[in-house]
Image (cartoon, helix red, strand yellow):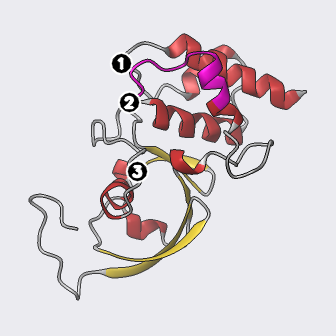
Amino acid sequence: MLLENSPPVRADTALDITLTINGQRRALKVTPWTTLLDLLREKLDLTGTKKGCDHGQCGACTVLVNGTRVNACLTLAVMKDGAEITTVEGLAGLGDRGGSNALHPIQEAFIEHDAFQCGYCTPGQLCSSVGLMNEGHAHSREEIREAMSGNLCRCGAYTNIVDAIEDVMQGAAR
């Protein structure tokens, strides 16, 4: 699928890459200029990852690459050949409770703490939260807020988001 105003794809410019996306290995042919965000949304129909600012400033496009959070709008898909990508659609089942239909504990905590309003930023907030916990550097509310500062919420649900993350982190420490 071509994006509006994108150059025509020539057979000699497309590259073969392999990504494991939400646990499923995918062999893909992509042009060198295709961002990971556009690949996920436009070619693979994983529309949970949002296109916000398209400049890496809002965090709406945050996904996990090999467990680390990245802005998919700033990442060229070809640079992640061989990587494991987790989008918001793949978070369920990753938590300690197991089972492919079980929500990740952070998803449950976001619901419990009403950590979303309009919901547009929620997929990026969720992926960033999991990445933050994987990193293991944030141990206080202030550190959580700082580590999540790259994910903007226009509705102002920050307190509830931090509450949800803190709740999951404290549960993991038990």
Q: Are marks 1 and 2 in contact (CB under 8 Å)?
A: yes
Q: CA distance from mark 1 to mark 2?
A: 9 Å
- Which residue corresponds to the image point at 29% horizontal and 72% vertical from the top-left? 32
Locate residue 71, reporting x and y percent: 42, 45
Asked if residue 144 shows in the view, the reply is no
Residue at the front extreme?
101
Q: Which residue is mark 3?
A: 72
Helix, strand or loop at label 3? It is: helix
Locate residue 12, reporting x and y percent: 23, 88
Of the residues tagged 1 and 2, which is closer to the observer? 2
Residue type of the residue flagged with mark 3: Ala
Quarter of the image where the C terminus is located: top right
- Which class describes the residues within 10 Å of circle 1: few (<14), some (14-19), or many (20+)? few
Residue type of the residue flagged with mark 2: Tyr
Residue at the bottom extreme?
12
Of the residues tagged 1 and 3, which is closer to the observer? 1
Q: Is residue 39 above or below residue 70?
A: below
Q: Which mark is residue 34?
A: none
Helix, strand or loop at label 2? It is: loop
Looking at the image, which is closer to me, 91 or 84?
91
Locate residue 167, reporting x and y percent: 73, 20
- Which residue corresponds to the image point at 34% horizontal and 34% vertical from the top-left? 57
Locate residue 151, reporting x and y percent: 45, 29
Helix, strand or loop at label 1? It is: loop
Q: Earlier in the sequence, mark 1 or mark 2?
A: 2
Q: Which residue is mark 1?
A: 154
- Which class describes the residues within 10 Å of circle 3: few (<14), some (14-19), or many (20+)? many
Q: Which mark is residue 120?
A: 2
Of the residues tagged 3 and 2, which is closer to the observer? 2
